[in-house]
Amino acid sequence: MNAFKDAGHLFRFAGLFVLAFVVFLVIRGYVVPKSFGQYGHYRGAAMGEIAAHPVKFAGHQACEACHTDVAEAKNKGKHAHVNCEACHGALAKHADDPATVTPTKPDPAVLCARCHTATAAKPKGFPQVNPADHSGGVPCETCHQPHSPAIVDAGGAK
Amino acid sequence: MNLSRRHFLVLAPAAAIAWKALLAGTPEEAANYKMSEHWWGMLIDVPKCIGCGNCVRACATENDVPEGYFRTWVERYHVEDENMTNPQVISPDGGKEGFPVAAEDAGKYFFVPKMCNQCADSPCTQVCPVGATFVSPDGVVLVDPKYCLGCAYCVQACPYGCRYIHPEKKTADKCTLCYHRITKGLTTACCESCPTGARQLVDLKNPKDPIHEFLKTHPVQVLKPQMATGAKAYYNGLDGSVR
């Protein structure tokens, strides 16, 4: 015990260190978010916040749940693999509330040309035309129904 | 109670540690979604891309991407006959409004959609000084805007140029692989709106995902494999001239 007789000042100093450490832990407990370090060196709750972003494209499953007739027609034609919102745009609001939010009909003159205008950069097998030469200004939908674009009565042109 | 200094010194840290453990509750996950059951990636089928720009527009709409910034974009390559190492690349407004008509002439043209490669060993997360960006347990590289300082180290570190500083939030922003959609069982906005199936969301932990068969049977590549980023955007039919 004699060895510690004159060491009182050291104990007081050590006590201060311990106190500072406790204060540090308490402040850290307040400042560092609960989920920090849950999965790694980041805030785990951030994932939930990012996942809370509103959905704007409803997804073709939602469209097909109601518009079964259109889906059926589309799935028989060459546009079977084109999802509804690829042409009609983001319509989650319409899917959530079909009565009040009514979508506007897209303009085929813009939409058809966007994919089917001929250019050397497109894959060779992809159906593409020069719109001016192809129809001479006649709207696409005069001959092609967008949901099933093959011309049936003309012997099934592509 | 008569608390001696000795007891106080023992009890105080113990109390602090216990209190900290009490605070560390379990943050909730989305219902019916288990992060441990997924490992997300993307398949990009270059020969199917027609350069319509649907993905770029859909991404901007879905994620409120500011004008002039891109989480995904489409590039058009023009490689003249022998000039493989010097392709001419254009991406007007990210390909949002399509591309000028390419004339038939010497060389080849093709489109390459670009986006965050969702690297498993991502250079962008390694440089973040504050733990604001990370690879989630389901394999998506995300940014925590509440932690991001906007120092832009990650913007420089990404070898694919997939990050930017959001002009209003002043924090790093990037493709989230539509994390708000894939955690609800939907596909990404770009995949949903791609008319040719050139982009497909893949779940590498799902044994039934057709990606496994696809990877076995196709010449698939990732961008900049020499950088060992563990990129999970798999490009099918990628030309050697693509950067």
Image (spheres, helix red, strand yellow):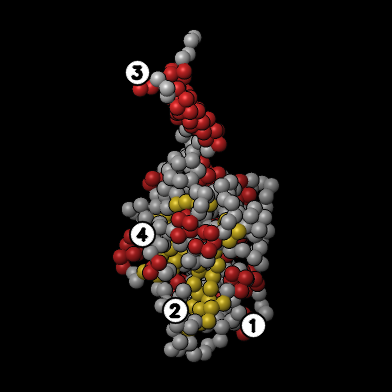
Q: Nearer the viewer, mark 1 or mark 4?
A: 4
Q: CA distance from mark 3 to mark 1?
A: 104 Å
Task: State which chain disc 1 sits on.
Answer: A
Q: Neighbour class for label 3 at 10 Å: few (<14), some, many (≥20)?
A: few
Q: Is residue B237 left or right of residue B161?
A: left
Front-most of residues A4 and A106? A4
Give whichever of discs 3 and 1 has the lower sequence position: 3
> Up-down: is B216 above or below B171?
below
Residue A6 lies, in percent from the top left, at 42, 22
Mark 2, secondary structure of its residue: loop
* Residue tagged 2: B241
Marks 2 and 1 belong to one chain:
no
> Up-down: is A24 above or below B171?
above
Task: State which chain disc 4 sits on.
Answer: B
For badge 2, the amino acid type reads Ser
Q: CA distance from mark 3 to mark 4?
A: 76 Å
Q: Are the residues at dot 3 and dot 4 in contact (C-beta closer than 8 Å)?
A: no
